Image (spheres, rainbow, N blue to C red):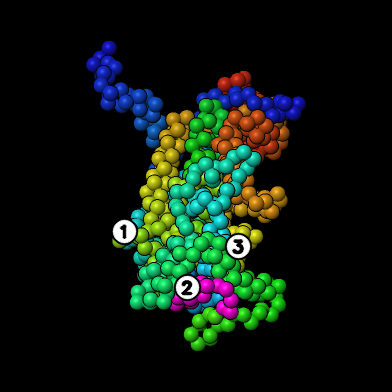
Amino acid sequence: MSVRDRLGDHDETGPWRGAYAPYDLVKELCIAIGVVALLAVLLTVLFSSPDDKPSTIAQWSRQQPVNFITAAANELNGTSDTAEYGPPYNHNGEGQHAAFIHLQKWLGVSHPINTAQDFVIGPLKTIPNDSSLQSAIAEYRAAPEQTRKAWGEAYAKPLEERETALEEKKTPNNAITVNPTTGTVTVNASGAGPVPLMMTSLLSLAKSGGLDGALLTSDQFFQTDYTKPLLFMADGGLLSERAEAQHLLGEQWGMMNETGSYPGQVWLWLYTLWYQVEPFKSSENADILVMLMMGVLSLAFICIPFIPGVRSLPRAIPVYKLIWKEHYRSQHSG
Amino acid sequence: MSASETPASSWTGRVREAAVEALPPEKLLPDKQPTYVASWIYVFGVASIASLVVIIASGCILALKGPAWWHYTGVGHFFNSIHLWGVELFFFVMVVHLWGKYWMAAWRGGRTRVWITGAIIFLVAVPTALTGYVSQQNFDAQWISTQAKDGLNSVGVGAFFNVTNFGQMYSYHVLLLPAAVVALVVAHVLLVRRHGVVPPFELKDHEASQTSTIAGSDTPISAVQGSGPGSDGAAS
C-alpha cells in the first residue's frame, strides 16, 4: 500500500447498516453524574482547594516600605511598568506588535491610567488637614515638567542604587534609612523638592489602609474594578515575591500553576510552553507572538477534518484497532 | 393525504416539522446503539457532560450565596472545592474524549460539524475556567489576573475583556461563558444524535487478515464485511 493510499483522504464512511444492541443513554448519564460527583467529593475531602489570602497595599507598605516607596516614585516619575505600558492604559508606549500587526495600539486606550495622578497625587489630595502636604502638592503641580522630572530623578536615584546593590548582593548605600519601630523611610536626596514629603505622606496613607480604598474610588458608590490597585501592586515586589515562593513566575510555567500543589490550569500547558522556548522567551513581543501562535493552532484544531495529512493520520496509525477491537473480533468470528 | 400529513403553514409548525424530521424521537433518545459502540473510550463523552453538570450545580450553589461566601464558611469552601475538582475532571475527561475522537476520525461520514462544535467547546471552556480563577478574590486571582492581562492586551482583547476588573470577570464566569458552553454542548449532542456515532474504519483485506491474526483465527474478515464505498462493513 502506498503512502498516499495509507493517508488517503477519501471519506468512504456511509450510514451503519449493521446490527444494533440495547443501550440506555439516560441510565448511562445518570450513573456518570453519580460517579463524577462522588469523585469530586472524594478529591474535595482529600485535597480541598487553595485559598491564599490576597495581598493589600497596606501589607505591602508595612512589610516592604522601601520597595513601596521605590514603586511609588516610579509611578510619580512615569517610569513604572504601568506608566510606560501603552494601550489599553495610556499612550506612553507602543504596545506589542508582530510584523505589521499592532492590535494593542489599534484597539486604543480603554482603561485610562495616569500613574502620577491616579496612584500618587489623587490619593494624596484626599488626606485632610495637612497644609504642608497640600502646599507640596501645589508646588509639584505648578512646577515645569523639567523641574518635576529633576525632582523625581533626584529622589529615585538612591532608591535605584539600593535596588541594584541588592540585586548584585552588595551592601546598599546608607542614603536610605528605615525606622524599625514606625516603618518610616527617610531618603537622603538633595534637590528632590517636595517629592520626599509627598512620598512620606503616601507611605503613611498606604500603611493606614487608606490607599487601598483611594485607588478603588471613582464617581460611584459601588466598586468592582480592581485594575488600579492591582496594577500598582504589580509594579512593586510583593506579588512577585509571593508568586516566586509559590512557583508561579513566568519562567516557572507561570499562571497555569496554582498556589500549593494543586494542578491549576493544566490545560494551558501549550500556551505556557511557548514562553519557555526561544524565540518567544527573549522576545519583547513574546505575548503577541504566543497569542498569535495559539490562535493559529486553535484554528488548526477546529479545522482538523479539512487538513490533509492530519485528518488521515488516524487511518494510518491503527489506534482504531484497539478502540474497535471487539467490533473487528465479532465481525471476524461472526 | 391526511390532514396530519399536510405541510404546516405557520412558522411554528414548520419549525416543529423540521425539528422532528431532523431528529425524530427514536433518533433523539434511542434505546439501542450500533454494536461497535462497545469500548471504554465512549464513556469519556458522557463523563464530560456529567462533569459539566457537577460544575454547574456546585457553581449555582456558590452563586446563590455570593462570591465571598466560600472564603469564610466551611460549607462554602467545600462547594468551592467541588467546583474546582469538577473543572479539573471536566478538562481531563474532555481531553481524553477529544483524543479518542481524533483517533476514530470522528468527523467522517458528514460529521464535520460534530468535531467542530466539540473543538470549540474546549476552546470556550478555557476562558470560562480562566474567568473563574480571576474571580476567586484571593492571591491566585491577583497573580493570575496581573499575568494574564499582558497576553490579552497584546492582541487588543484587553480593551473589552479586562481580567483585573472583578465585576466584569464574574459576569463572564457565571453567565456569559457558561451559557456559551452549555449552548455548544447542546448543539454538539444534537449533532451526534442526528448523525449517530461514527462507524469503525472499514478494514482492507490485508488489514483484516492482520486483525484476524490478532483475534486468534485465520478466517478473513472480508468474508463477513460489506464492501465498496459507502459500506461500513456491516456484519449481517
Numbered tag placed on residue A220 in the rendering: 1
Q: Position of residue B133 (x, y in %)?
A: 47, 58
Is-magenta flag for residue A58?
no
The residue at 35%/65% (across/down) is B69
Numbered tag placed on residue A249 in the rendering: 3
Q: Is A209 situated left or right of A107 in this image?
A: left
- To which residue does mark 2 refer? A198
Judge depth for marks 2 and 1 and give the one in front: 2
**Tag 2 and tag 1 share a subunit:** yes
Measure the alpha-carbon separation of dots 2 and 3.
Answer: 33 Å
**Tag 2 and tag 3 share a subunit:** yes
The tag earlier along the polypeptide, 2 or 3, is 2
* Circle 2 SS class: helix
The tag earlier along the polypeptide, 2 or 1, is 2
Is most of the magenta stretch helix, strand or loop? helix
Magenta region = A187-207
Residue that extends furthest to the left in the rendered view of this protein = B3
Crowding near pointer 3: few (<14 within 10 Å), some, many (20+)? Answer: some
Q: Amino acid at mark 3?
A: Leu
